[in-house]
Image (cartoon, grey):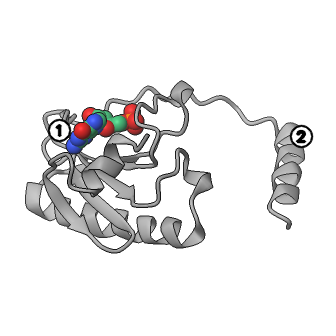
Amino acid sequence: MPSIFTRIIGGEIPCHRLFENELVIAFLDVNPLSPGHALVVPKEEMAELHMLSPESAAALGAAVAHVAGAIMKATGAAAYNILQNNGALAHQEVMHVHFHIIPKYQDGRGLALTWKPCAIDHTAAAELATRVQRQLGA
Ligand code: 5GP
């Protein structure tokens, strides 16, 4: 069954479209956190970011930067967050890759974050870095 975003890409469901090329579409979120909250979506239907083809991933990254600049100019927002959720545990609701562009305004409208950092364990970090490098073939 096609995702809701594939149905938007196909024109079956309407959207407020901001940008489109061969590989990517961007449109306004239907339940925005702030004015200008947008979604940038690859036409390749994959659930999570790491599943995308390199071509889709590259086009998506370029489009996020391009559309974010236009949203900042059009809204006059003070700042913005990029959010990209992968997996239900990470609050992903639509299982088709997408980046959120969320303008942040002086009055607080936008993404609210709870960030709870802890001190790094350098021994564990070095071991983990080695494991990831192996996965990357480095
Ligand atoms: P997620 O939690 O998966 O990262 O976010 C999914 C986002 O898609 C939500 O912010 C939600 O408002 C948005 N969304 C879901 N269905 C539609 C739709 O039919 N049209 C648009 N424009 N946005 C949608």
Frontmost residue, 50 versus 108: 50
SS of the residue under disc 2: helix
The reply to whether the C-beta atoms of the residues labelled 2 and 1 are less than 8 Å apart is no
Residue at which label 2 appears: 123
Amino acid bearing label 1 = Ser
Residue at point 22%, 53% (across, down): 27
* Residue 39 point in image, percent of width and height: 30, 50
Q: Which mark is residue 34?
A: 1
Picture quarter containing residue 62? Answer: bottom left
Q: Nearer the viewer, mark 2 or mark 1?
A: 1
SS of the residue under disc 1: loop
Dot 2 crowding, Cα within 10 Å, few <14, some 14–19, many 20+: few
Measure the C-alpha gap from mark 2 to mark 1: 41 Å
Frontmost residue, 55 versus 117: 55
Frontmost residue, 76 versus 117: 76
* Residue 76 point in image, percent of width and height: 10, 56
Outermost residue, front side? 1
Residue at point 84%, 44% (across, down): 128
Amino acid bearing label 2 = Thr
* Residue 7 point in image, percent of width and height: 29, 48
**Ligand 1 shown in quarter:** top left
Dot 1 crowding, Cα within 10 Å, few <14, some 14–19, many 20+: some
The response on whether ligand 1 sits within 8 Å of label 1 is: no
